Structure formats: structure tokens, C-alpha cells
């Protein structure tokens, strides 16, 4: 039986708002519940022998279109999450890294992001990557511009891959919760040959049990990368 290697996992955490609505709660309660789920899934991944990186889509370049109150709440929640999470990161050997343009955030939040990256930089069980003010097109454009600024006039795929913000150029498995089946501008370059898994579970209800079952069905997939086998 084929056993596909799994190093880089990506997750589009979707459905917080609908989870709250179903319970007659405000959308912000859904985001709070969703933050708990990230902790559970991240610690599960840190214990998994194969997974090296887990990249979570937390705020897209398009999410600024939401009402200011919701955006402000998400920024506060992120700051609180990082503060509370430090213990979990250190206890579970998790390195934290942000991708996306964080310059749009408040100086205090940028500082917290940088500090968390630096305090956890020697942890080796897992790299948890949060995509913050992230867009796949913005990342590729930024990568190309930085290569042009270096003086390059002809780019290879390897040049572009190495200038991306992610420490990998290929995602093995992408999971999206909430029943939506689209990419929403996430990791466009890195998803080139990723296996895709969609579940109708809303993000706050997603569990390590469901992840485990998705991972075991991933193991049976035949990844051909254009070849025959
Ligand atoms: C995902 O949940 C979290 C973010 C995009 C920040 P949503 O807030 O998109 O939840 P739904 O899709 O409205 O249910
Ligand atoms: C994608 O979810 C972005 C994040 C999970 C952060 P959205 O809820 O923003 O995506 P669309 O708008 O439904 O495609
Ligand atoms: Mg959504």
C-alpha cells in the first residue's frame, strides 16, 4: 500500500461565524471558540512523528472587508492568543512563525509577533505558521519584486520558491473546514500538488479525532505528481 509522506500541512480554518450563529451567539464568540481549536490541533501536530509544519489561515488580505468591530476583535484575539500560547509553545517544542504582511497591524501586535517568533525559535517538534494579513498573490508578487530588487532579470521556479515567506515550497495536504470548497487566495504557489480535503465540520467543532481520520485516509492516496505509479 502506498504511504504518502506528510511533512507540510495547511488548514483553512473556516466556519467560526456560522458556528456562533447556530448557537444564537455573536460572531466574536465563534472566533474565541476557534482559537481553542487551533491550540488542540497544533499540539496534536507537534506530537505527530511526521508533520514538520502546520500552516493555519487566520486572517486574509481580503478579511479587511469585514466590519471594523470584527476586525478589531480579531486583532485583540490574536494578541491574547499569542500571549497565552507561549506556555503551550515551550512545553510542546513548537516554533511559532508568522507569514503575511504584518506591517498593517498595530506596533504592539507586531512586537508581540516578533517576540513570540524569537522566544520559540529553537523549538523543533513543529513549526506552527499563522498566516496573518496573508494572500497567496501578494506573497508571490512580493517574492518576485524582492528578486528584481536583488538585480535578477530572469527567474527560475527555484528562485521564486526560495523567496517565499514559507520555509517550504510544497504543501502535502490542505484541509478546509465548514463545507466551502475553495482556496480563497491561500498558499497559491505551495498548493500546486497538494492533496485537498474538505469537511463540513465548522472550525470550532473540528477535533484531533477528525484530523487523525483525515490523516489516515491521506496515507492511502496515490500521489502521482504527473507520473504513473
Ligand atoms: C473563519 O471563520 C475565521 C476567519 C476568516 C477570521 P469565518 O469568520 O469566516 O466564519 P464564517 O465563514 O462566516 O462562518
Ligand atoms: C478564508 O476564509 C480566510 C481565513 C480562514 C482566514 P473566508 O471566510 O474569509 O473565505 P471566503 O470569503 O468564504 O472565501
Ligand atoms: Mg468564512
Image (tube, grey):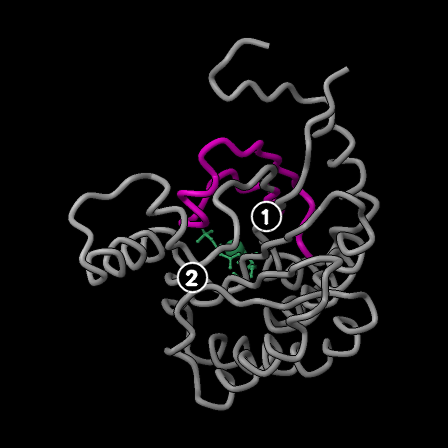
Crowding near pointer 1: few (<14 within 10 Å), some, many (20+)?
many
Q: Which residues are magenta?
A: 175-203
User: x and y percent of residue 174 in the render?
Assistant: 58, 41
Compared with 86, 189 (above or below) is: above
Residue furthest left in the image: 153
Residue furthest top in the image: 228
Task: Indicate yes or no: mark 2 CB to ligand 2 under 8 Å.
Answer: yes
Which mark identifies residue 134? 2
| Quadrant position of the C terminus in the picture | top right
Which mark identifies residue 10? 1
Magenta part, dominant SS: loop
User: x and y percent of residue 79 in the render?
Assistant: 59, 82
User: x and y percent of residue 63 in the render?
Assistant: 42, 64
Is 52 in the magenta? no
Q: Are marks 1 and 2 in contact (CB under 8 Å)?
A: no
Q: Residue at x 40, y 43 (%)?
A: 189
Q: Quadrant of residue 22?
A: bottom right
Compared with 223, 22 (above or below) is: below
- Give 218 or 69, whichever is nearer the viewer: 218
Residue furthest bottom in the image: 108
| Quadrant position of the N terminus in the picture | top right
Q: Residue at x 42, y 79 (%)?
A: 68
Q: Quadrant of residue 157?
A: top left
Crowding near pointer 2: few (<14 within 10 Å), some, many (20+)?
many
User: x and y percent of residue 137 in the render?
Assistant: 32, 51
Q: Residue at x 24, y 43 (%)?
A: 155
In terms of sequence position, does the residue under pointer 1 or pointer 2 come before the other?
1
Compared with 39, 189 (above or below) is: above
Distance between mark 1 and mark 2 Cα atoms: 13 Å
Amino acid at each position: 500500500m502506498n504511504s504518502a509522506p506528510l511533512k507540510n500541512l495547511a488548514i483553512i480554518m473556516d466556519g467560526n461565524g456560522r458556528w456562533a450563529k447556530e448557537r444564537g451567539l455573536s460572531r466574536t464568540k465563534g472566533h474565541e471558540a476557534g482559537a481553542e481549536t487551533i491550540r488542540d490541533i497544533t499540539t496534536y501536530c507537534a506530537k505527530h512523528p511526521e508533520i514538520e509544519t502546520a500552516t493555519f489561515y487566520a486572517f486574509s488580505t481580503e478579511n479587511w472587508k469585514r466590519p471594523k468591530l470584527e476586525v478589531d476583535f480579531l486583532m485583540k484575539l490574536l494578541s491574547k492568543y499569542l500571549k497565552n500560547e507561549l506556555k503551550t509553545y515551550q512545553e510542546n517544542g513548537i516554533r511559532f512563525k508568522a507569514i503575511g504582511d504584518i506591517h498593517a497591524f498595530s506596533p504592539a501586535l507586531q512586537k508581540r509577533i516578533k517576540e513570540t517568533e524569537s522566544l520559540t525559535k529553537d523549538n523543533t517538534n513543529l513549526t506552527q505558521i499563522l498566516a496573518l494579513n496573508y494572500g497567496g498573490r501578494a506573497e508571490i508578487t512580493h517574492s518576485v519584486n524582492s528578486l528584481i530588487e536583488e538585480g535578477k532579470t530572469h527567474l527560475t521556479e527555484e528562485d521564486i520558491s526560495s523567496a517565499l515567506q514559507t520555509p517550504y515550497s510544497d504543501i502535502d495536504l490542505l484541509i478546509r473546514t465548514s463545507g466551502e470548497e475553495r482556496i480563497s487566495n491561500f498558499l497559491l504557489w505551495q498548493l500546486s500538488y497538494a492533496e485537498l480535503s474538505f469537511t463540513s465540520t465548522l472550525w470550532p467543532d473540528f477535533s484531533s479525532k477528525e484530523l487523525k481520520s483525515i490523516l489516515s485516509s491521506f496515507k492511502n492516496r496515490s500521489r502521482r505528481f504527473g507520473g504513473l505509479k
